[in-house]
Amino acid sequence: MLKRAGIFLSTLFLVSALFLILHDQAFALDETDQAIHKLQIKPSDVLIPAGVPIGQYQRVIRPFPNWNLICDENLKSKRRVCNISQIIVSDRGDVVFSWSLAARENGEPLFILRAPAALGVHSIIHLGLHDGGQMVSVKISECNQIVCIAYQPVGPRLRTALKNGKRVDVAFGDQASGYPDMILPLDGLFAALSSIRG
């Protein structure tokens, strides 16, 4: 009789313990379920052009010293578009300046410069090439609430500068005759460009 009572109590204890475990799991699942509803999937950083089937567009990033070679390719049409970019961030990780070497539809190279939106349209970005010549003045052509954009064709002076891989002084606004806002390296850019040409 005592043996049966012991078995009954043991069984009751196991059932009670199982109930508590399942109850705790259910409560945890409820909390997890609530947390899941507050989350969302981060969309891709790659903007897929209209008309390109899903899975038929890819981005390849190749790092070079100080620069990244970024190539987007439509796998269906076999069309590839590349640019070579450098991004400057603050100690807090905020982007303060970036520029990319790209090409027009006719193949002519140009720099696309992105500066703080506070500069405003028609402000100037000055580039010092350390070649004995005057600073190259690039007028900002468009701005939104986040960024201002300017375009600079790659002429003979810029071609020589990127081949030599020296530094470039960058100054915003009326600071062409003063100290630069930043000094950026061109080293690595020509190597990335050469890799595109094969």
Image (cartoon, rainbow, N blue to C red):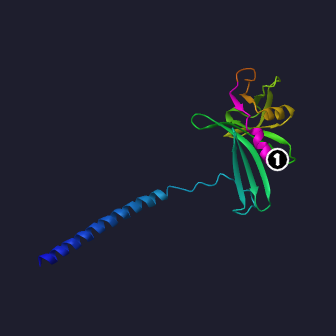
Q: Is disc 1 surrounded by few (<14), some (14 to 19) or many (20+) residues within 10 Å?
A: few
Q: Considering the image in quadrants, where does the N terminus appear?
A: bottom left
Location of residue 181 in the rendering, given as x and y in whole percent from the top left corner: 68, 27
Residue 4 quadrant: bottom left
Query: How many marks are shown on the rendered structure?
Result: 1
Q: Is residue 157 above or below residue 28?
A: above
- Magenta segment range? 180-198
Tell me, yes or no, if residue 78 can be seen here.
yes
Q: Is residue 112 visible?
A: no
Which image quadrant for residue 152?
top right
Residue 145 among those drawn in magenta: no
Residue type at tag 1 = Arg
Identify whether 36 is placed above or below 136: below
Please say if 78 is above or below 178: below
Q: Is residue 154 left or right of residue 1?
A: right
Give the secondary structure at mark 1. Answer: helix
User: Residue at point 76% right, 41% down?
Assistant: 191
Residue 35 appears at what percent x and percent y? 46, 56
Q: Which residue is mark 1?
A: 197
Q: Position of residue 67 (x, y in %)?
A: 70, 40
Residue placed farthest to the left in the image?
1
Residue 173 occupies quadrant: top right
Q: Is residue 181 magenta?
A: yes
Q: Does 34 sit above or below residue 130?
A: below
Residue 138 locus on image (x, y percent):
79, 32
Q: Which residue does the image show at 85% across and 48% down from the upper left?
A: 105
